[in-house]
Image: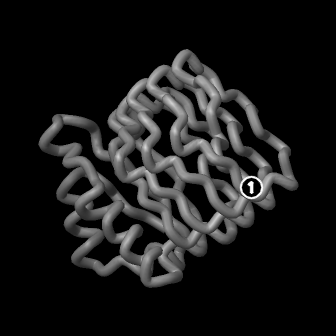
Amino acid sequence: SNWNTQALTTGYYMFSGCSSLQSIDVSNWDTQALTSANGMFRACSSLQSIDVSNWNTQALTSANGMFRACSSLEMLDFRKASFNKVTDAAYMFYDDKALTTLWLPLTFDLLTSIDLSIPSWGATPEGLASLRWTFGEGADDRTAKGLQPCTVRLHANVYDRLTDTERAAAAKKGWTITK
């Protein structure tokens, strides 16, 4: 918990495969220089909690498989984060079967598509609030910023948790939601 991470630029597979890791205190990590988080927590299948709510992701360009196969992880809070420099978010949450609550701001300025097929997202009241926040208040207005539209692929269960009105409001901001 007291690591000096101020100069950390790559977390490339840092904890990948730590299948017995249940929790880790990264809440005070200074991640302002972090550019690559590829596979950082990949296959941490016992990881139940991780507090990334204070992470500064302004420099992050690649998050490929960052939390892939964290099958016990139930919640992630990135409300204070920005992903506007990310060019690769493939498999970021792939196979995260327990992830019901994901506060993920849609600030992916450089992407034109992102796959967020997480079947459990929104299955709880708090999770549903996080889902609606992500596509409402947490979604940047790409149209106003002059950015190309971005297609977001959701699991069919999750797609159906958003109302037609909510999907239409996201579309007005330049986010095309599909299943």
Residue 28 or residue 127, whichever sits in front: 28
- Residue 173 coordinates in the image, percent (x, y): 20, 53
- Figure quadrant of residue 48: bottom right
Give the number of marks. 1
- Figure quadrant of residue 131: bottom left
Q: Mark 1 points at which residue?
A: 69
Name the quadrant of the N terminus.
Answer: top right
- Residue type beneath disc 1: Ala
Q: For the point 70% across and 38% down, which residue is it?
A: 39
For this orientation, the residue located farthest to the left is: 144
Residue 113 is left or right of residue 145, and the answer is right
The colour scheme is one colour
Q: What element does badge 1 sit on?
A: loop
Q: For the point 40% across and 41% down, which residue is it?
A: 112
Residue 138 or residue 159, whichever sits in front: 138
Residue 156 or residue 29, whichever sits in front: 29
Mark 1: give few (<14), some (14-19) or many (20+) Cα within 10 Å.
many
Residue 108 is left or right of residue 18, and the answer is left
127 in relation to 154, above or below: below
Residue 74 is left or right of residue 178, and the answer is right
For this orientation, the residue located farthest to the front is: 2
- Residue 3 coordinates in the image, percent (x, y): 64, 29
Q: For the point 31% across and 65% down, which residue is it?
A: 133
For this orientation, the residue located farthest to the top is: 7
- Residue 71 coordinates in the image, percent (x, y): 74, 63
Q: For the point 42% across and 77% down, which residue is it?
A: 128
